[in-house]
Amino acid sequence: MITVALERLVPEHIRRFEAYIPSKPDDVLMKMYRCRRLYRLNNNENPLGPPPAARKALAEFPPPRAAIYPSGDAYHLRRRLAENFGLDPDQILVGNGANEVIAFVIKAFCREGDNIVTADKTFAVYEWVAEFSGFQARLVPLKDFGFDDRAMLEAIDERTKVVFVCNPNNPTGKYWSLTRLKSFLDAVAGRRIVVVDEAYCEFVQQPDYPDCIRLIDQYPNLVVFRTFSKMYALAGLRIGYLAGSREVVDIIRRTCVVYSVNGPAQAAAMACLGDREHILRTRRLVREGKQFLKAELAGMGLSTVSGEGNFVMVRLPINDNLAYRKLMSRGIMVRSMTGFRFPGWIRVTIHQRQVLEAFVEALAEILEEV
Ligand code: PMP
């Protein structure tokens, strides 16, 4: 038998890297934890489901078209997005979720010895893609649960190519105002690519929250990420995009694998972009749910951190992985936060009232028991 000489095949940065294992499907988990139903409060999904126009587009998608490749560069969707935001279609790249476009950017700008800068407690995929691609991720500690602009500027060195700012930050919900973001961009002075990940922007209603797409003209090194997974409730279809100056997007386009976004996803996204009614209904659900949850948790003596976005972080007096397992056996899945470098915390997605009630009740039981 021939064994593979992996030692010599595998680069050091891959050897060191530990694969992320996503959660198992509901049917498997329900068997494992012996529960009859499972509420997923772990992935910041929108419990209202897709807007009506997206549902219609999906229902009307002709099955024979599954045999045909979709538009390889989401031609019509890019035109629709461009019209919506006052950009040129060539300033937009659509990906298989915003997750995919992270790699486009890193691959386009980093070479051996380069690094990216981001926060230590934020969406982890920036860090992971950099590291498994062989680049250093310089992680700057959060300050008061938000991105620390000064420390980020200090962390930038001559080998930094891309800076990732998650605004609002997942998982803390804190955000940079327009003034703060602009002074950060001014300090960077076009010398690095600055990515602002706005995955949760449609949830934010603060008057000083910046819409970064409007800043692209002024800052050609700015790249903005958006997704249809959160507000538009199309997470299962995997579709997101980036926008930037024509110059920068021309470079990023070279690293993007075309045909990665399926036809139903393109059709559904195009149909529902900008559906105000859906956005308002979702915002109401999130506002009311957050209020309810925070009051209940405060009543239990638990502290929470939340800001913008459809999620709340909760500090527990017990180990978060233990809480995860105990909640799972009661049919409730949350995000345990040790992996996000927040040991002792969980992140909970805002859901329908009756689901949040079930969560609160289960958590109260668990805390009583321990
Ligand atoms: N950015 C942030 C901040 C996120 O929270 C997520 C999803 N959890 C993504 C990007 C990726 O989203 P998508 O589903 O579009 O890949």
Image: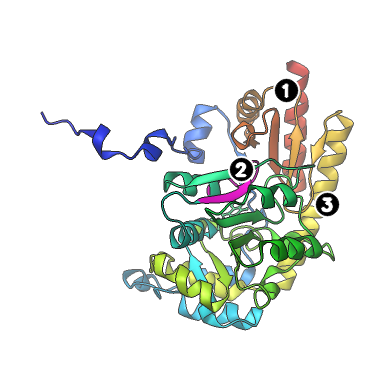
Check disc 1 and report the residue beneath it: 366
Could you tell me how far apart the alpha carbons at marks 2 and 3 are, in whole angstroms?
Answer: 34 Å
Can residue 105 be seen by looking at this rendering?
yes
Residue 200 colored magenta? no
Could you tell me how far apart the alpha carbons at marks 1 and 2 are, in whole angstroms?
Answer: 34 Å
Q: Earlier in the sequence, mark 2 or mark 3?
A: 2
Residue 293 in which image quadrant: top right
Residue 106, image x, y percentages: 48, 57
- Ligand 1 within 8 Å of the CB at mark 2: no
Amino acid at pointer 1? Ile
Q: Is residue 230 above or below residue 84?
A: above
Q: Earlier in the sequence, mark 1 or mark 3?
A: 3
Q: Is residue 220 left or right of residue 30?
A: right
Magenta segment: 115-125
- Residue name at image x 88 percent, y 39 percent: 295
Q: Is residue 275 above or below residue 305?
A: below
How many numbered circles are shown?
3
In depth, the one of 164 and 209 nearer the eye is 164
Amino acid at pointer 2? Leu
Q: Is residue 230 above or below residue 44?
A: below
Could you tell me how far apart the alpha carbons at marks 1 and 3 are, in whole angstroms?
Answer: 25 Å
Check disc 3 and report the residue beneath it: 288
Q: Is residue 102 left or right of residue 304?
A: left
Helix, strand or loop for disc 3 = helix
Q: Residue 222 bears which disc, if any?
A: none
Q: Earlier in the sequence, mark 1 or mark 2?
A: 2
- Residue name at image x 70 percent, y 56 percent: 167
Check disc 2 and report the residue beneath it: 139
